[in-house]
Image (tube, rainbow, N blue to C red):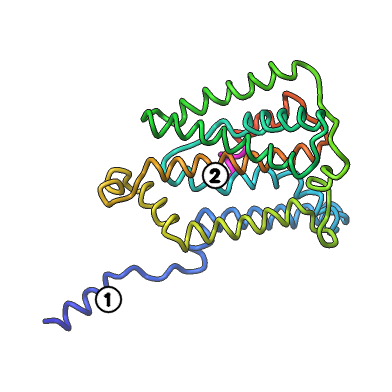
């Protein structure tokens, strides 16, 4: 009897995914599209695969990709933050005024990170402490942070940044490897490890699967989500530092429309 049950269980086990089944999954589709883009562009232009051209292309997405890392975890936990672009603008504005007052590069970086962290914590507190919808709250703070930026700047631009500040967004650490992209690679490895190899990552998946069940399992859902919102704000502040450094100036329209791009990437 036990042998019959064992053989029946083996029959009912799903067959291992083949090559074509993996290719048809979402990740396989994205990989195929990416390879197709590379092939078409390489055939269209002999300069496309030039290492410096590829390196320069990374500047178009690195700041957004840094925000995507914690945003993906926040979305897994059934929350969202639509105020990231406005957080970048507010962080950049505060850095601009500090630079105009003579603040040096290390402190400017701390200011950018600090403002982003505070914005993320403010979002998280409103969502977790008052049980409000994250999409409603962050749409509100999206307008709030951008509005403060317009009040402080008007139509002017701030560009009194020290020369050393420009290296963060324009410098290279080794050959054609930019500092921005190197930093993204390190952060991607860290977030991948946290999500897939730590209790924090497992709690994130548990909350996303069933927040009520996670709560009754002993997970402090509100505190966990507050940390995720803070991480999104902190990475938005870091993106603000890199973007401001790369552009060399602060305007009230900086990072305008990045919200949808970041969520789509996530």
- Neighbourhood count class around disc 1 (C-alpha, 10 Å): few under 14, some 14–19, many 20 upward: few
Q: Is residue 18 above or below residue 25?
A: below
Report the front residue among 69 and 7.
69
Q: Residue 231 carries which label?
A: 2
Q: Residue 10 carries which label?
A: 1
Q: Relative to residue 126, is residue 167 drawn left or right?
A: right
Which circle, 1 or 2, is nearer the viewer? 2
Could you say which quadrant of the image residue 102 lies in? top right
- Neighbourhood count class around disc 2 (C-alpha, 10 Å): few under 14, some 14–19, many 20 upward: many
* Circle 2: element type: helix
Question: Could you tell me which residue is drawn at 29 percent across and 46 percent down?
Answer: 215
Is residue 194 shown in magenta? no
Report the front residue among 232 and 152.
152
Q: Is residue 112 above or below residue 170?
A: above
Of callouts 1 and 2, the N-terminal one = 1
Q: Is the magenta stretch mostly helix, strand or loop?
A: helix
Residue 89 horizontal/vertical position (percent): 68, 29
Q: Which mark is residue 227?
A: none
* Circle 1: element type: helix
Start-end of magenta stretch: 261-266
């Amino acid at each position: 009897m036990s042998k019959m049950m064992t053989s029946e269980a083996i029959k009912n086990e799903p067959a291992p995914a083949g090559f074509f089944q993996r290719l048809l999954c979402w990740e396989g589709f994205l990989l195929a599209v990416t390879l197709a883009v590379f092939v078409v562009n390489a055939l269209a232009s002999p300069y496309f695969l030039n290492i410096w051209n590829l390196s320069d292309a990374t500047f178009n997405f690195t700041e957004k990709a840094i925000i995507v890392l914690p945003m993906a975890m926040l979305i897994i936990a059934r929350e969202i933050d639509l105020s990231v672009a406005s957080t970048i603008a507010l962080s950049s504005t505060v850095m601009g005024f500090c630079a105009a007052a003579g603040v040096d590069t290390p402190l400017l970086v701390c200011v950018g990170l600090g403002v982003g962290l505070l914005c993320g914590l403010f979002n998280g507190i409103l969502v977790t402490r008052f049980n409000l919808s994250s999409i409603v709250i962050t749409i509100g703070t999206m307008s709030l942070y951008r509005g403060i930026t317009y009040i402080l700047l008007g139509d002017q631009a701030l560009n009194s940044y020290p020369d050393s500040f420009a290296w963060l967004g324009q410098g290279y650490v080794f050959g054609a490897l930019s500092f921005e992209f190197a930093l993204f690679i390190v952060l991607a490895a860290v977030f991948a490890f946290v999500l897939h190899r730590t209790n924090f990552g497992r709690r994130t998946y548990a909350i996303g699967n069933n927040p009520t069940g996670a709560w009754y399992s002993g997970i402090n859902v509100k505190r966990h989500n507050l940390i995720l919102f803070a991480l999104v704000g902190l990475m938005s502040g870091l993106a603000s530092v890199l973007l401001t450094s790369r552009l060399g100036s602060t305007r009230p329209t900086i990072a305008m429309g990045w919200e949808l791009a970041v969520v789509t990437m996530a």
